Amino acid sequence: MNSPDEPPEAPSGSPDLPEFSRLLRGDVKGFAGAIDWRIFWPLLPLVVFFALNSAWPEDLRRTQVAIAASFAASVWVFLNNRDSGIIRLLAVLVFGVVTVSAIVGFAANSDKAFVSQNISTDFLMVAISLGSVIIGKPLVGAVARQAVPALRDLMDPTHRVFVYLTLTFMALNLGTGIFRIFLLGEFSANEYIWVSRITTPLSIAFFAACYFAIKRTAGVAVRLHGL
């Protein structure tokens, strides 16, 4: 029993959500069990392309090699992500975008055609985010509940925090996509890869906001369940 001045104990089985401060300190012990890090695998093809398109000798068909290697990385991600649900869906979508970009870029020997894949992904995420809210299954909620299974018993998939975060994600992708179109027209493919990273802090800020908003809401749910 708790005394009147003591907070209620968390119910049995309440989630042990990771503390953000631990991650900032580099203490990732235990995070693997709380978060499914495979949600970041779709970034691999772009990283591979960037590395080869920057370092591979230009006279050895740099563009084709970079595209082929990036596509191979995309195939690896696709084949090694056998989950169902939203994580699987995102992997399929990324694979589809990279495949189309690889075919066009390789056939046209155009690195710009290939790197424009993230622009296509931006607008694809806009459509998916809007559609997910319309059908009552906000994207951020689906991802969060699959990545952190403990949330499933605490937060409804249609919770308003998921709706707000999904709409924010949609607006972020819309702005980023438009901005990247401008960048692609002004810079070479290699320069574009570097300069387009200027949007990374916005993405990091968004994911941090998601973390704190969801953790706070989940904490409220835990306290309510313990009353």
Image (tube, rainbow, N blue to C red):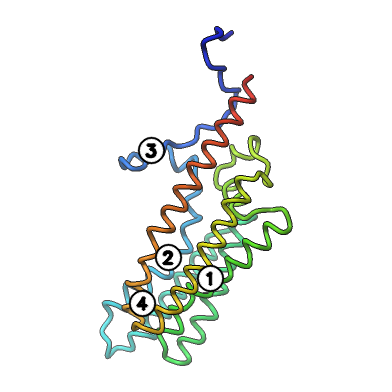
**For mark 1, what is the residue?**
121
In this rendering, the label closer to the viewer, 2 or 1: 1
Q: Position of residue 224 (x, y in %)?
A: 63, 25
Residue 72 sits above or below residue 36 on the image: below
Q: What residue do we see at 52% from left, 60% from top?
A: 80
Q: How far apart are marks 4 and 2 (CA)?
A: 17 Å
User: Is residue 161 left or right of 181 when viewed as pictured?
Assistant: right
Residue 31 sits above or below residue 194 on the image: above
In this rendering, the label closer to the viewer, 3 or 4: 4
Secondary structure category for the residue under label 3: loop
In this rendering, the label closer to the viewer, 1 or 3: 1
Q: Is mark 4 in CB contact (under 8 Å) with mark 2?
A: no
- Counting residues from the N terminus, which is met first, the one under dot 1 or under dot 3? 3
Under mark 3, the amino acid is: Lys
- Counting residues from the N terminus, which is met first, the one under dot 3 or under dot 4? 3
Secondary structure category for the residue under label 4: helix
